[in-house]
């Protein structure tokens, strides 16, 4: 079992930055991939970025060059540094973990970008 708790969301003006954190607990050594998803109002949840336990990263096109995902395997923590934020980045951001052939989700943290 893995538990995930996100933090760091909030309200920011367009062009600003936020850093999200997700702390994993439980069987963190079993986590292979950590990822950030987001869901805007009336839209489907979408992948933002992911990182493997070896540090290989993947970004969706709409955040490339603006967001950076990183992880601390010893702490079981994944981060999302979000720069040059746009109003369309407004969403609930979720942390996800793939571990032992199961997916785990955090409760989400709200990010609101004002124009």
Image: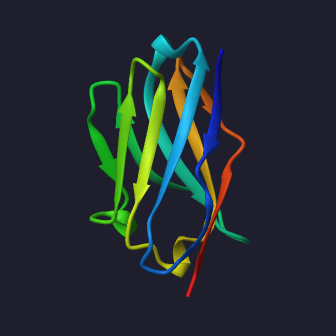
Residue plotted at (45% across, 36% down): 78
Residue plotted at (61% across, 47% down): 94
- Is residue 33 found left or right of 105 in the rendered image? left
Image height of 111 relative to 113, above or below: above
Residue plotted at (61% across, 56% down): 9
Tell me residue 107's x, y (percent).
72, 42
Image quadrant where one finds the N terminus: top right
Image quadrant where one finds the C terminus: bottom right
Image height of 49 relative to 2, above or below: below
- Write down the quadrant of residue 79 in the picture: top left
- Is residue 61 found left or right of 47 in the rendered image? left
- Write down the quadrant of residue 45 in the picture: bottom right
- Is residue 63 found left or right of 41 in the rendered image? left
- Is residue 16 found left or right of 64 in the rendered image? right
Image height of 108 relative to 84, above or below: above
Q: For the image shown, how many numbered marks are present on the structure?
A: 0
Tell me residue 5's x, y (percent).
65, 35
Residue plotted at (52% across, 16% down): 28
Tell me residue 98's x, y (percent).
51, 27
- Write down the quadrant of residue 12 in the picture: bottom right
Say which of 84 and 37 sits in front. 84
Q: How is the image coloured?
A: rainbow
Tell me residue 82's x, y (percent).
42, 60
């Amino acid at each position: 079992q893995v538990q995930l708790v996100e933090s760091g969301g909030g309200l920011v003006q367009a062009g600003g930055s936020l850093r999200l954190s997700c702390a994993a607990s439980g069987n963190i050594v079993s986590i292979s991939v950590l990822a950030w998803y987001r869901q805007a109002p009336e839209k489907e949840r979408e992948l933002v970025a992911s990182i493997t336990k070896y540090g290989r990263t993947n970004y969706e096109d709409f955040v490339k060059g603006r967001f950076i995902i990183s992880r601390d395997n010893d702490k079981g923590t994944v981060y999302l540094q979000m720069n040059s934020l746009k109003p369309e980045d407004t969403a609930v951001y979720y942390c996800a973990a793939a571990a032992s052939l199961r997916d785990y989700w955090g409760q989400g943290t709200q990010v609101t970008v004002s124009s």
